[in-house]
Amino acid sequence: MTGRETFTSRWGLILAGLGMAIGAGNLWRFPRIAAQNGGAAFLIPWLIFLFLWSLPLLIAEFGIGRGARRGVIGAFADLFGRRYAWMGGFIGVTSVMILFHYSVVTGWTLNYFVAALFGQLDGVDTAAYWTNYSRSVWQPLGLHAVSVGLAGLIIARGVVHGIERANRILIPILLGLLIVAVIRSVTLPGAGEGLGFLFAPDLSRLADSRTWLEALTQSAWSTGAGWGLILTYAIYMRRDDDLVVNAAAIGFGNNTASLLAGIAIVPTAFAILSESDALNAMAAGNTGLTFIWIPELFGRMPLGDFVMPLFFLALFCAALSSLIAMVELATRILMDTGTTRKRAVQVVVAATIVCGAPSAISPTVFDNQDWVWGLALMISGLFVALGVTRYGVSRFRDAFINIPGNDLNLGHGYDWVIRFLIPIEFVFMFGWWVYQAVTVLDPTGWWLPHRSLSLGTCLLQWGIALALLFAFNQRLAAASLRGHPGNLAQPTQDG
């Protein structure tokens, strides 16, 4: 049969959007960053930037995707002009480059779920276990391939039978498991101190600019705003869906999952360790907290053998649901050129297995790619705002957001946020991270392109990507506009 693929209901789209947004960053980065930046005080700017960065960009992506019914490159070329295809291309390149190492993270979570389930983490030196695993070759490489292969199998089944059905299973499981972990955490003796740290704000921390900049960064990275992922899912939304309500449900759902993860981890740390040791654990970095300290904490707590596999299963569900969205973004870009879904998925899976292999077998390469393309996501968010500004924010709002039948419409304040506030926030956030690169991360060689966490390596890799995108801009635009919007003539399995 032929026909355009669409989600079957608003909830189908919202669950897919939640799957996109709720990823490893919610469970491993949020608790750490919140603890390092004042706990409860951090939550205030974090919530503010949900409204001033994340939701405006999610709404913009929804509008672009529904308006163009094409992937990121074709959407920018169609709505904003062919000469801006490179902007959509940069967003696509950034998310695909993250895909190449995010599949490795998904493999890590799968390994730890299986290891916890069969008691392989009981009584072991968790730091040595992580070091041996991360520096091995075949196990991380194999699980990286398994993870992206599983995501590919889901994507190949189409929007309804693949993406929507998978997220209808993964997201309830994820949230249910987080609630179980929260209940166990808050009932531990001594957990009250951690809850107090997380919810009783020391307002003096709000005078620290770092608290605000970390909150903005967490909101930008965690919600998926500006990644092009929700833009891709919006291709398949029904024409009468209220995208403002959808975006709000995804944004608040994402923040709720982050809070649940924080409540599951921070009170546990305070209950098991001294306050200073708990804060040191939170400062151990994403992988250090998740794969060294979390097994250590759950190993010491009553019923930890039961809770630990559930936590890593939740982490795997979160990682897989986000991985599905990334694979779909890359698949959609190829489908816009006339490639069938089946063939596009095969190409994306094969490319991810090959291009993600260096990150799977080398922690240094992984850290480099995570640094370079994580920072590039801020540029992607700016490009979304600039594209809408190029179209005309008021015109865009009237054409693609405030449609008849909406439950919520946006006023002129949205125009101001997109045109002025998003670029201003970008300057401060991006500038702060550049400053961190020069003064903290690699002060002695920040300009060198071969250093893994330098500013130089970012400029080199972004420069290569942008040079190629500029050089092939017209060809990219023509290829991405080749098919019908939404792939109207594309055979699907969804009927």
Image (tube, rainbow, N blue to C red):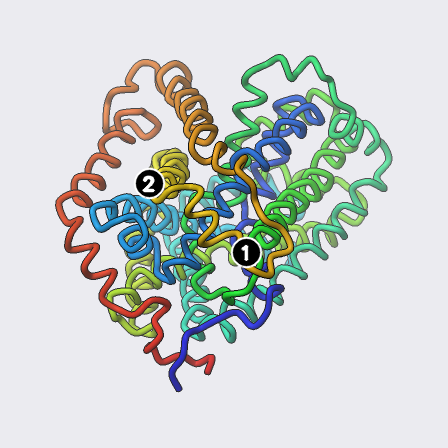
Residue 441 located left or right of residue 293: left
Marked residue nearer the N-terminal end (2 or 1):
1
Instruction: Report how far apart the C-alphas of labels 2 and 1 lie in the structure.
Output: 26 Å
Q: Is residue 179 above or below residue 363?
A: below
The kind of residue tagged 1 is Gly
Residue 107 visible to an observer of this rendering: no
The residue depicted at 64 percent of the width and 55 percent of the height is 407
Q: Quadrant of residue 204?
A: top right
In this view, the residue farthest toward the left is: 471
Q: Is residue 495 above or below residue 473?
A: below
* Secondary-structure class at tag 1: helix
Residue that badge 1 annotates: 17
Q: Is residue 247 above or below residue 235?
A: above
Q: Quadrant of residue 364?
A: top left
The kind of residue tagged 2 is Arg
Q: Quadrant of residue 277?
A: top right
In the picture, the disc for residue 390 is: 2
